[in-house]
Amino acid sequence: MLDLIKIDEFSSTPKYRQLANSIIEGIQAGHIKEGDVLPSINEVSFAHYISRITVEKGYNYLKTLGIVESIRGKGFFICVGSVPVNFRIFLLFNKLSVHKKIIYDSFVASMGDAAGIDFYIYNNDFNLFKRIVTKRELDYSHIVIIPHFMEGDSIAVEFINSLPKEKLILVDKLLPGIQGSYGAVYENFELDILDALVQAKDDLAKYQTINLVFPQSSYYPEGIVRGFEHFCREYAFEFSVVEHAEPQAGSAYITVMEDDLISILDQIKQKDLKLGKDVGLISYNETPIKRLLFEGISTISTDFVKMGEMAADLVKSNDRTKIENPFSFIHRSSL
């Protein structure tokens, strides 16, 4: 039974859940049967180089699912004859920022305990993404991907096209060139920022210029720049797209990267400028902390909770619909 337990050091799925998932898969495959005694905590810890606490947590998790029971002095044993084959999901995120964690938490909560989820983070690196996908050992029911790559999207399209489309769900972003019938919950980056800024235009009108802080190294789509420029030309705003910002009185700034947001706030404080009066500020992507920073930072953002829920709905329904996720402007005192 020790050979059936698979612990992947590269996976972001907690090791205790990997342990539990391995046992569940062994039961589903008929390799582990009712009454079988599980290896001792010490045996698993030694064989797979994980802590005793992790092994015990995995076994106790199986107890909460009603799959395992324990008898003092005898250990843990399987108490069911079968486990229904449920969803087995290969989940790949480009990174785990605050808002990506909101998507993850919403997705996992919506799927519930019945789903086995193997979670990986590839840090916007296509080569790492390709290695993770290529080395997968299991036949997953669904492959759920947030596709943001520093090298650009085109490099990933051919590889993603090699994946089975009936299992594929893209989250947060559509990739031009992906063929076949697959599911998606996505942002329309160009149209979303345009519509959001239209909602904010009366607040923006008191500033002389609007500046989009959009580093070339950003993995964010160029559609954001196109939507921003469309808005400024349509409503006759003076504007610029810059790599970095040094806030000046009379200007408003839109940041897509959290590092740029913090840098601007720090400079505003150092220059003794009044946020929302001397300088306007809008941050891309709503997170809880932005309600509190400097009495509130205005945001333009998709609904990340909804995104996770709808991705889970696509998995559970085996639907291949492409759904545009809600997007909005949230006004606070920074503008």
Image (tube, rainbow, N blue to C red):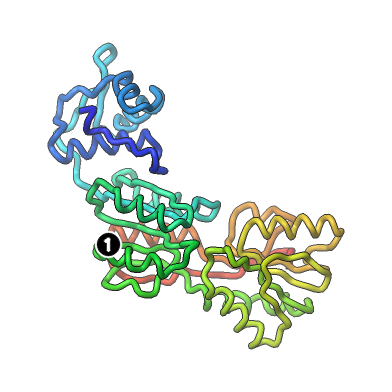
Is residue 275 something that shows in the picture? Answer: yes
Residue at 30 percent of width and 35 percent of height: 20
In the picture, measured across the screen, residue 140 lies left or right of residue 56, that is left
Residue projecting furthest to the right: 272
Q: Quadrant of residue 244?
A: bottom right
Q: Quadrant of residue 160?
A: bottom left
Neighbour tally class for label 1: few under 14, some 14-19, many 20 plus, Cα within 10 Å? few
Specify the quadrant that holds the C terminus. Answer: bottom right
**What is the x, y in percent for residue 9?**
38, 38
Q: Nearer the viewer, residue 55 or 84?
A: 55
Q: Amino acid at mark 1?
A: Leu
Is residue 277 something that shows in the picture? Answer: no
Q: Secondary structure at mark 1?
A: loop
**What is the x, y in percent for residue 222?**
54, 73
Does 55 appear above or below 152?
Answer: above
In the picture, measured across the screen, residue 168 lies left or right of residue 242, that is left
Residue at 24 percent of width and 47 percent of height: 138
Does 201 appear above or below 282?
Answer: below
Q: Nearer the viewer, residue 238 or 37?
A: 238
Does 100 appear above or below 183?
Answer: above
Residue at 61 percent of width and 78 percent of height: 228
Residue at 20 percent of width and 28 percent of height: 1
Q: Which residue is mark 1?
A: 163
Q: Nearer the viewer, residue 11 or 155?
A: 155
**What is the x, y in percent for residue 2?**
23, 27
